[in-house]
Image (spheres, rainbow, N blue to C red):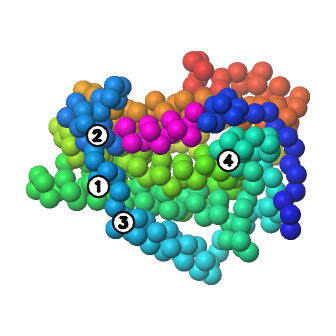
Amino acid sequence: MAPTQGPRAPLEFGGPLGAAALLLLLPATMFHLLLAARSGPARLLGPPASLPGLEVLWSPRALLLWLAWLGLQAALYLLPARKAQVAPVSALAPGGNSGNPIYDFFLGRELNPRICFFDFKYFCELRPGLIGWVLINLALLMKEAELRGSPSLAMWLVNGFQLLYVGDALWHEEAVLTTMDITHDGFGFMLAFGDMAWVPFTYSLQAQFLLHHPQPLGLPMASVICLINGLETISTATGRKLLVSGWWGMVRHPNYLGDLIMALAWSLPCGVSHLLPYFYLLYFTALLVHREARDERQCLQKYGLAWQEYCRRVPYRIMPYIY
């Protein structure tokens, strides 16, 4: 069946010029973070201390391992099991049919490209990247144990926090079907690179930093960090009614606030001597503010006057009394 034409949406991410810039900026940023984490100065801003040779950047063995990893995940995806169903129609994404090849390549034209019942976007959205993130963290923990005799408390905290986060995401995998990535964005470079490269390598930045820059962490501070990470959060509402009580009566996107609190807890075990481990918190703040603005536009189109009334009754977007 040919893809159906979705409604044309306004261009996002700065249009074709912004998309072209992000095509270069995102991989460059990821490589910079990886190099900075293992360098002596560990500078978030400024050039890395040294650049690796081509023999370090390219490894046929690493490519084979990556392909084997994708093959294993694809095989597990195809196993008969209870699986949430995505839209049966391969429609054109509202934000990805501008006619500009660079912009469409970045955002993706098709909403759910698939072969038979293998949905590429749904497959890539969680499992390969999130499980890969946990495995990278575990490998870094084991490497620290090899170098120093045992993993540090900070490394244990980072691994434990992020393992809980990934485990919760996989346990509630069907919830991803209500997210903007699935319902609105096409499957282009943004999601493919984000799911397969940015998530496992950038989200493991704290563990990479701790391997090369061990930080002392006492039990009292560790207990405070655990308390911060354990603050109760709530998931996104998926019903048609607009909640105006509880957390949703305080801010319009309390789940985003929960994500930011967890991001802070993941960074605190790395101490405060370097800005680099806090890149995730800074990046996620910018990401969620941008995503919240996209959410607001879509909710206004979907709910109309009801959304305007909701905004009047709940004036704060993410942070009570601040934003």
Which residue is at the far left?
149
Q: Earlier in the sequence, mark 2 or mark 4?
A: 2
Give the residue type at disc 3.
Answer: Pro
Q: Are marks 1 and 3 in contact (CB under 8 Å)?
A: no
What's the distance in space between the residues labelled 3 and 4, CA to CA? 27 Å
Q: Which residue is mark 2?
A: 51
| Secondary structure found at label 1 | helix
x 41%, y 65%: residue: 63
The quadrant holding residue 286 is top right
Tell me if residue 48 is in the magenta stretch.
no
The quadrant holding residue 119 is bottom right
Q: In which quadrant will I find the C terminus?
A: top right
Which residue is at the far bottom?
80
Q: Earlier in the sequence, mark 4 or mark 1?
A: 1
| Looking at the image, residue 156 lies above or below residue 292 | below
Is 305 displayed left or right of 132 in the figure?
A: right
Give the residue type at disc 2.
Answer: Leu
Q: Which residue is mark 3?
A: 60
Report if residue 212 is visible in the image. Answer: yes
Start-end of magenta stretch: 21-33
Q: Which residue is mark 1?
A: 55
